Image (cartoon, coloured by chain):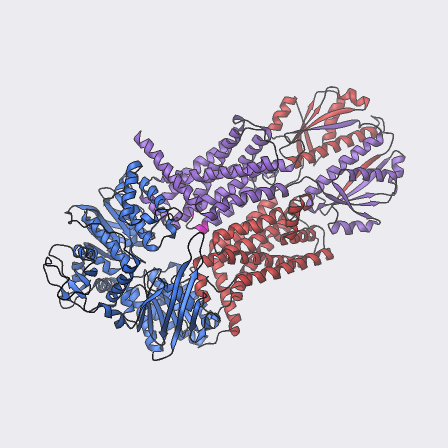
Chain colours: A purple, B red, C blue
Amino acid sequence: MDDFIDFWRRLAQLCRKELLAILKDPANRAILVVPALLQSFVFGYAATYNLTNVPYAVLDQSQGAASARLLARLDGTGVFHRVATLTAPRDIARVVDAGDALLVLQFGPDFEARLAQGQEAPLQVILDGRNSTTAGQASAHVAEIVAAYNAELRGGGMPVTAVPRVWYNPNLETRWNIMPALIAALSMMQTLMLTALSVAREREQGTFDQLLVTPYTPMEIMLGKAVPPVLIGLVQSSIILCVALFWFRIPMAGSLATLYAGLAIFTVACVGIGLSISAVSVNMQQAMLYTFVLIMPLMLLSGLATPVRNMPDPLQVATLANPLRFAIDLVQRVYLEGAGLLSLWRNLVPMFVLGAVTLPLAAWLFRHRLV
Amino acid sequence: MSAPGSGGFWRRLVSLTRKEVRQLLRDRANLMMGIALPIVLILIFGYGLSLDVKNAPVAVVLDDASPVARDVVAGLSTPGYLAPRVVGSAHEAYALMRAREVDAAVLVPADFSRRLAAGDAQVQVLLQGADASRATMIRGYVAGALASWSQKRADRGEAPRPAAGQVQVVDRMWFNAANNSTWYLVPGLIVLIMTLVGAFLTALVMAREWERGTLESLFVTPVRPVEVLLAKIIPYFCVGLIGLALCLAAAAFLFHVPMYGSLLVLLFSAMLYLLVALGIGLVISSVTRNQFLASQVALIASFLPALMLSGFMFDLRNVPTAIRVIGQILPATYFMELIKSLFLAGNNWPLIARNCAILAAYAVVLLGVARLVTRKRLD
Amino acid sequence: MSEAAVVVARDVRKRFPAERGERETVALDGISLDAPAGALTALVGPDGAGKTTLLRLVAGLMKPEGSLRVLDVDVAADPQSVQNRISYMPQRFGLYEDLSVQENLDLYADLHGVSREQRRGRYARLLEMTDLGRFTARPAGKLSGGMKQKLGLACTLVRSPELLLLDEPTVGVDPLSRRELWQIVRQLVDDERLSVIVSTTYLDEAERCARVFVLHEGRLLAQGRPEDIRRPARGLCFVAPPPPGEPARLLQARLLDDTARIIDAVPQGGEVRVIRRQAERGETAQQPGDALAWRPVEARLEDGFMVLLRESQSEAGAAAPLPALRAQAASGEAIIEVRDLVRKFGDFVAVDRTSFTVKKGEIFGLLGPNGAGKTTTFRMLCGLLPASSGVLQVAGVDLRTAPARARRSVGYVSQRFALYGNLSVMENLTFFGSAYGLHGERLRARIGEVLAQFGLEAQANAASGRLPGGYRQRLAMAVALLHQPDILFLDEPTSGADALARREFWRRITTLAADGTTVVVTTHFMEEAEYCDRIVIQDAGRLLALGTPQQVRKQAGETDARRMNMEEAFIGIVERGRKRETAEAVA
């Protein structure tokens, strides 16, 4: 029993030392808070595929009422803004190439006539494909407006209407997807950086040798180095969570307890990876470089920017070793869908395994990696 | 006693540059950053990242077993866009949605055929809010598929024709006919890699010299700060160009991204941007004089903005004004615009002239600032 | 002043602005001096005296207040023209570690504009002087510490400057390399009438200079020729033999404590060298109790320096209190045993079949040049490195494989005083105390004791990283002694410390040993071997000498007629060892 108490006491002291060493440096403190805040604001505002401002140009060779009504509908959405009214087809290239308009609507001379005769009247929509995703969204939006217009022309409903119902994100705002993902992604970045440098820095300072000479076992040292970053990582996640909840007002459907439980396991896995990098690096510079080189693929192939499902199969398999992939999925499910802890086992188990493998590995490397 | 001074400029420059090159080649970590990382990024961006919604799996629940209802499934089946499959019950559809095995579910109600005859049938489309942009696209696809299905029925005479004409949207996607997000992601990658090498790597390398104290001994020689800066710029400029060559090769041969613009213009503008990035890196390192801080600042001040705010993936016109203004200030934005145009649109001379002029101005200013803050002083 | 001075300083000051709530640092506080041309000038003083700052000002790397003219140029106004004409070797010479010796030399030759023809002759001479001819292709990062310093000096000397500035060129370097470096410098001064300003903490080096400037806390304490500096100590220096059977350090400690009558005492050659205060008429410093007579000796530079330091220090205030000295505890049984210890790194043999024992309560020293294997041996003793083969027992266990608890009887102070810089003194003590199993009331009591013992009470809440070097050393010791270990391992504990701090340090060690703690120490300061009961000399992994300092000196060839100090003995033994090795290789 005494040993047990002793163990916890020593561990508590190790953690206290680690936290003090991290937090007492004002530069460190700034780095822990400022990037998280900055990035969540910037990402939150910049990372959006929702269209709020689509500049377009019109070449209306029909000059009829029908095209005017359609254009009125377009302008009425508040999303489309006309930047140019063209008079000749060759103007189209000019305005699209220069990037002034994302799309150009071209009504042929017989547009009005064909409609009156009950025929199909084609409407050319020319899109700037230099960002094909945005262009695709714009095109979909135009199609919707045209469909509504067609309904009006028909004097009633379409024979078939699709009634959309959206699960969890009624306005289909991309920000609602990205912010929860950031809760995991940004904290992973900071956690990895912090832990990867921690052992390397102690080695350079000479305090690591001092630690190894004390009666601490490598496992205790490793735990002492692991627990504070987990706490700090959770604090980072909380900062971003607050920005999402209170600034961007993205409502959370799930329970905080589940969210934090998942985040805790995720952060432990990240810390394990970071400590292993640190144990392997000879000095701080190496640790920094290894971390950076690792962070890039981890972030890109996690589903943060693009869906994992779109990736080729070998890469999808590779992402099974990426805790961020599971964390993003977990956070999105808890935040947007209100998923319960048990239903998330597919995410929790891999992260748990990762942590369970990397932490002891780090402990072993501490002792046996001879510098 | 030899006479140092301006006569020795070339000799000193050559010697310093040679030292830099040797260090670069012998320091594995630097090489890894400069060469291996770009390769990794190219492969990830080219093969791994895709924003396209193609062959989206859709679960279809037919509560109405009539042939008309089943025909809807055929109508939804648009190759390249939607890949519907029939499932037994709504419950099954929900499970598939939750497991993310289908992107959407279409529920055809029991009274579908009856109401279709009356002219106001409805189907429910369930969309996954967890991926909003995908859902938006699919919503559009489904609506479009149903509309053309109705049209075809009218054409075949199975349904009454509408009284008035109908507008038919004909899409033409300029510059990216294949509607392939890789076509714009890969050129954008070039900007990222230039930024990485120019700003991040250089900032790190220069800050390391300050930290290690090698500059102290160097300063008490006839060497001038300009020479020290130039000697750092030249090798990393070349590394950046190597990264550029790798990207271009990959774009052409691996991903078949077309290149309609002039290669020479591309090279010229890339070199300008590289100088800009190098200037940023040198300023950061001379001011921070500390590797860790330099890397953090370089990431936050150059790489992250290049990724998020330069128009790479997110259209700047749709972000709040404050953010858009920041984007307009970034040199990366101008290079990004130029590169995408050169690849996908060809030579637009006004655009080229304007953006190159802006990049050149940035290069001059930043390199000038770098020269100002790099002094042979330790205090 | 015979010729024009190369450096003329008038009321030079340098302040560093306050950083984050600290006070402003005054590095130099009104220095006025003239450094003569064509001669060796020494700047001596403890760490933090301002030597490096002064040299950097002369080199034009910082801007001074006051007037500073170098080679008759106002260096503040036109640093570049000064930098064109001088050479400067900073304390940590920035060698490019990935570049080879030859490439480093070429780089500096190019930067200084040395022509190809000049280079050939110059290189040959430099490589010969530094004995680096065989290593021209080796990357600079793979050289030993002494070789790196020599290469740094060579790079600085690729051309003959008008003025050469050397900032502590021999710190941390083994005595052999130190001698070689000085030979090089002296040769250049003699051959080329080079003007050289050297800053150093080794006072025996300053003896060989034409002019000496003593700096202390940013001010000039004394200046003149070496004999001028020696003068204050003339007639006050004696050698006192200790009572038979008693180690010299005990007498030294007693004398050091007697501050009323004694200025300084240090063990030397088995006896104690004493500087006593100016005596009143008829009074002598020698106590009736001292069995044997004191012999007067010539004053050295170090003696003059100690007199000056003590005077200025007594103005500044008392040093930390020293522990009371009790009688030497009986020692006898072996507490550390090393038999046929071997450590290999791949093909390289770092430690080659070394055997020795350390008895309980003795002070045991490991001496050797850089790369000798003493640090590796030390690390194996502490359990930081596994042995390739051999037997290693500390307090009855092998620390590498023993359970963690066994390490509770061991204390360790590393060369860099491994402390958590961001944490305060109290926090460091609390952490390390709990690491060794202390907690609660006992921990608090012990912390209070060591704070008092080491005079750290005033700094209890100061961040340890911002303490001056002397205080950090005390804190490192305090940390190691919190848990009252049986064995104390000290790795180069006094490197970089000034003479006063070293005296104080060894005074504490003496008390510890007297109380029964076993102390194992490595050091570069050869005279510190005199404090040890027994020493070991290693070179290239082999054990060359083992015994008391007296036995080792005899082994090196000391006779009553020709007495040696430890440094000479060391050099003699190592050179003999290397000659034997080459003879064996040939045979």
Residue at the front extreme, as displayed: C281
- Do we see residue A245 in this rendering? yes
Q: Nearer the viewer, residue C80 or C126?
A: C80
Relative height, residue C499 to residue C342 (above, below): below
Snapshot quadrant of residue C260: bottom left
From which residue to which does the magenta span run? A281-286
User: Is B303 drawn above or below residue A320 in the view shown?
Assistant: below
Tally of numbered tags: 0
Question: Which image quarter is the N terminus of chain B in?
Answer: bottom left
In the visual, does B235 lie left or right of C151? right
Report whether residue C498 is seen. no
Q: Which of the 4 image quadrants contains residue A147?
A: top right
In the image, residue A282 lies in the stretch drawn in magenta:
yes
Q: Residue C344's x, y, as percent?
A: 31, 51
Residue C334 in the image, given as x and y percentages of width and height: 18, 46
Picture coordinates of residue C348 (x, y %)? 32, 54
Q: Would residue A317 appear left or right of B351 to someone viewing this image?
A: left
* Residue C206 sits in quarter: bottom left
Which residue is depicted at the point 27% across and 40% down?
C406
Q: Residue at x 84, y 37 (%)?
A: A69
Q: Is A256 on the left-hand or right-hand side of A149? A: left
> Closer to the camera, B276 or A354?
B276
Q: Nearer the viewer, residue C364 or A238?
A: A238
Place of residue B211 in the rendered image (x, y in percent of width and height, measured from the top left): 45, 57
Residue B220 in magenta? no
